[in-house]
Image: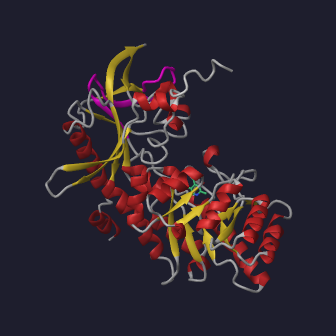
């Protein structure tokens, strides 16, 4: 039944892989990709819509009718205005953590009522703007709450205000994305001495403090640990409401963090699995007494993005075949610097963009940057890549091609969204143009070449 719905909604894993192959072939055929444009990013519009629908359905299935639920996309995962606009179209809001991300959400037309501000280092000006707009704000720490106190005294605000807590339930397999360790920099560390009592008193003194927020995981964190983080946050909300004798905490923001399977085309775990697990672990959270906010990022977009890069040269060193491509550290920074934590699947395509046939050969897929560690994949078994072929880095729709690293002044590649059209062709829409050499010069002080001469 679930699979059937997936297929109808366009979200089936096999269908998504088939759409990806079609899009790569069409991108070559339509000239978006070729010798003069050796790298692009592709986004599967049908797949993105399907994932947003799956997220909504998963929580609808476990929440009491009428429960307010806001699914706020974590903008940092794919900070591209047309993507945010597409998600807005599916009913989603935005979770932002900087003035830039807020500006992107606003440019996409996401309203303040559907926006949540979460950064750990909000300046007074950022807080003032958010409160003036009525955007939900989650305070990270006591000093930030002091600032909000002062701002709220000087100008009344419609913003729902919450406190971010760190339930300190522990980390996952990747330190850099483990947000609930005992010494994590995020939120109020709940198990530290006096911290829980401080949160209760902070709420007692501020009737407008109505939310709790916890984001206790990300890639590498097991679902059971994420569920424990939500459970702890819910227990704190219950304690606060009980001790204050009123239902002051009315909304719980459970963050994002659903991990992504980077090893195959299977979508595992699913939103439905996570929502079901939460509803079993924390049934009270779903009985209609609390509004819910979610902040998923990677799990919504990762599997819908692909970086496709041309093989400029094929060579050998020490007996190892090496495909020198145009995708490396500039688009896959985490993978290149920490390949053990962030491996990517690579698929091989021929010069016409058709899946490459042939016996698997162990080879390296290298990037274009001038340092020897710039490898997208090392010792990978694939049909032997040759000059003019294409290598695709799969599952790169979140935290990859929109997270450019300007090593060697390599340009940001163009990003195209795609969808099959009734005319039988794949249609493309430009999400972001490629950066030009002129752009690079301008952004690198090109307007003030003499700036250092006359000091
Ligand atoms: C990064 C982040 C998210 C999104 O995390 P994903 O792992 O991409 O789902 C959500 N909330 C907060 C506060 C974050 O910092």
Image quadrant containing the C terminus: top right
Which residues make up the magenta segment? 367-393
Q: Is residue 332 magenta?
A: no
The image quarter in which residue 47 lies: bottom left
**Front position in the image: 317 or 424:** 424
Image check: 8 left or right of 117?
left
Q: Is residue 375 magenta?
A: yes
Rendered residue at 26%/53% (across/down): 419
Residue lying farthest to the left in this orientation: 423
Residue lying farthest to the front in this orientation: 454
Image quadrant containing the N terminus: bottom left
Rendered residue at 58%/21% (across/down): 450
**Front position in the image: 185 or 171:** 185
Q: How is the image coloured?
A: secondary structure
Give the image location of residue 355, x and y in percent.
Answer: 24, 37
Where ligand 1 lies, by quadrant?
A: bottom right
Give the image location of residue 264, x and y in percent.
Answer: 39, 47
């Amino acid at each position: 039944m679930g699979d059937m719905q997936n297929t109808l909604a366009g979200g089936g894993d096999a269908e998504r892989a088939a759409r990806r192959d079609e899009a790569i072939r069409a991108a070559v055929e339509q000239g978006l990709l070729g010798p003069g444009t050796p790298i692009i990013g592709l986004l599967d519009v049908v797949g993105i819509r399907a994932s947003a629908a799956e997220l909504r359905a998963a929580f609808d299935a476990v929440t009491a009718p009428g429960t307010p639920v806001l699914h706020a996309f974590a903008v940092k995962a794919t900070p591209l205005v047309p993507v945010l606009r597409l998600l807005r179209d599916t009913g989603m809001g935005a979770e932002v953590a900087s003035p830039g991300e807020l500006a992107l959400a606003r440019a996409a037309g996401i309203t303040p009522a559907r926006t949540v501000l979460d950064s750990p280092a909000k300046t007074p000006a950022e807080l003032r703007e958010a409160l003036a707009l009525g955007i939900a704000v989650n305070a990270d720490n006591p000093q930030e709450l002091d600032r909000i106190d002062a701002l709220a005294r000087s100008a009344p605000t419609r913003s729902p205000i919450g406190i971010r807590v760190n339930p300190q339930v522990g980390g996952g397999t990747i330190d850099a994305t483990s947000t609930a360790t005992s010494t994590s920099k995020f939120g109020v560390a709940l198990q530290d001495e006096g911290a829980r009592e401080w949160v209760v008193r902070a709420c007692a003194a501020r009737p407008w403090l109505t939310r709790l927020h916890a984001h206790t995981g990300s890639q590498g964190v097991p679902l059971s640990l994420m569920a424990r983080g939500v459970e702890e946050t819910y227990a704190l909300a219950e304690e606060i409401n009980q001790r204050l004798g009123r239902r002051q905490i009315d909304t719980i923001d459970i963050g994002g963090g659903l991990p992504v399977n980077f090893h195959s085309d299977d979508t595992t775990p699913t939103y439905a699995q996570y929502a079901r697990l939460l509803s079993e672990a924390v049934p009270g959270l779903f009985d209609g007494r609390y509004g819910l906010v979610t902040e998923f990022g990677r799990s919504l977009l990762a599997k819908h993005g692909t970086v496709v890069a041309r093989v400029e040269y094929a060579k050998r060193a020490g007996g190892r075949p090496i495909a020198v491509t145009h995708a490396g550290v500039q688009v896959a920074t985490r993978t290149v610097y920490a390949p053990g934590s962030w491996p990517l699947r690579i698929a091989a395509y021929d010069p016409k963009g058709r899946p490459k046939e042939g016996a698997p050969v162990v080879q390296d897929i290298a990037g274009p940057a001038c340092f020897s560690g710039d490898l997208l994949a090392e010792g990978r078994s694939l049909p032997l890549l040759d000059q003019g072929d294409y290598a695709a880095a799969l599952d790169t729709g979140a935290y990859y091609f929109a997270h450019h690293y300007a090593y060697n002044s390599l340009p940001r590649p163009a990003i195209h969204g795609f969808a099959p059209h009734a005319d039988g062709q794949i249609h493309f829409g430009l999400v972001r143009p490629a950066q030009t050499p002129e752009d690079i010069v301008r952004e690198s002080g090109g307007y003030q070449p003499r700036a250092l001469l006359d000091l």
